[in-house]
Amino acid sequence: MKCSRCLLQLQTLRLVGQSVRAAAQYGAGLQSASSSQPSVLHNTKHQVLRRFHGSPACAKTPPTEFIKEFDKEKNRSLVTQDGLFEQISQDAKSKATFNKVVEVFMKRDVRRRGHVEFIYAALAKMQEFGVERDLAVYNKLLDVFPKEVFVPRNYIQRMFNHYPRQQECGVQVLEQMENYGILPNVETKVLLVQIFGEKSHPIRKYQRLMYWFPKFKNLNPFPVPQQLPEDPVDLARLSLTRIANDRDAEVTIYQMPCTDVTESGEEVTLPHVVGTQSPDQVELLSKHNPSKPVFVEGPFPLWLRKKCVYYYILRADPTPAEEKVEEPYDPERCLDYPLQLDLDLDRDFGDEESFDVEDLDEGPVFAMCMTGRGDQSTLNVWISGLQQNNPILGQVPTLFRLEAGPKELEGAEDTESEHERTANPETPREEGEVTEEEEPRRRRSQ
């Protein structure tokens, strides 16, 4: 042990002596150079004072400028990825062009740099291309992710949400599928496992969709068709069939949309008028008191997916309590669901038979209709058509309670008829027609 220590001390002494000799020689060289060339001394001083070298990139660009250049490249990449969809004209936007843009991005770079920004831009543009309900397009967007790169390798990476930005993007793709009611398939699961692994947030989102979507898929017994009819008459027939609560109700077309030429040579566009009425409503209207008026009210909105249509109703005031006649029910009218049950049950003193239920009677509804123009002249066509099956309408006064509807229902003829009525107060009215000003007078007289 003592010998080894002595050898180490001798080696250190030799190294120190060599460094002292080199320093002395270097100092003598500096003195000779300073006596002969003063300019060289200036350069050597700078060389002596020079410290550790940095990397070439850091020496060329300071950190702040490097960050600014990185931000510029990032913004430029976002603009180009969004610009891939903007370069396509409005007429050429279709599923084929959308898939072509995705393929161009996938072939541009092997590493798929900027794929998250591209997927977000593609999700925002899917509705413009009409592919927001196409499952194959969503699988193609998931295929943009690099494979087996974001898969966690151990439980620590899995616990700390490995690559959170990419996982959030994958969950956003599945959420948009959920918003449009698209059910994933096996290909979607295979892609998610290859990209994020089996224990990731997108896989959990996929499992929730596959659990709940089949349960709610056929929950509605009266589903709305995915593609609504473009013809307004067919759309009105579909809407009135959904509103009517009776399968025996018949839908009648009182007027088809057409263009007519008047005697003066002017072209007049006639809107469609489609109505519905059930046999029970016909029977109820035949029992109506002719001395009491009926009302045409509307428009009332009805939403069919993203389409809003409007309908009108023919109704009467509720029957007073003293005039109501309770009709005996027919026990054989419905054998599956009896209308009344007479059960003698033992009741306790704690049972309370009274309920705080507000019984609101809004009056009977006799018929419904849909039209392309909600003015009084168009609705008169509907009332005159109803008189064929309901002759009592010729004796009952009809009042119009029309509200300010949308622009497509407000016809120009409505304003013209008002001007004519104010200019010519002696204009004859149709039989049974009563204005709103005469309604309080009638009620006072009654």
Image (cartoon, rainbow, N blue to C red):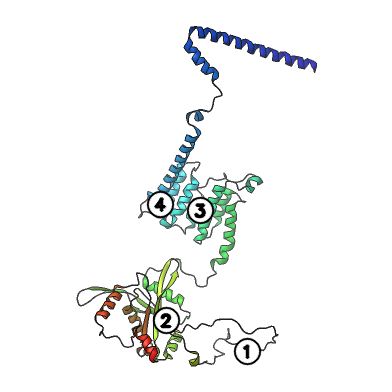
The residue tagged 3 is 139
| Residue located 40% across and 79% down the image | 297
Asked if disc 2 and disc 3 are in contact, CB closer than 8 Å, the reply is no
| Residue 295 position (above or below residue 13) | below
Q: Secondary structure at mark 4?
A: helix
Give the image quarter of residue 369: bottom left
| Residue 446 position (above or below residue 186) | below
- Amino acid tagged 1: Asp
- Amino acid tagged 2: Glu
Q: Position of residue 38 (x, y in %)?
A: 48, 10
Front residue of 346/433: it is 433
Q: Position of residue 381 (x, y in %)?
A: 33, 81
- Residue 250: numbered disc: 2
Q: Nearer the viewer, mark 2 or mark 1?
A: 1
Q: Secondary structure at mark 3?
A: helix
Task: Name the N-terminal-most of marks 2 and 4.
Answer: 4
Q: Quadrant of the C terminus?
A: bottom left
Q: Residues within 10 Å of mark 2 (few under 14, many from 20)?
A: some
| Residue 337 position (above or below residue 446) | above
The residue tagged 1 is 342
In the image, farthest residue toward the right:
1
Asked if disc 2 and disc 4 are in contact, CB closer than 8 Å, the reply is no
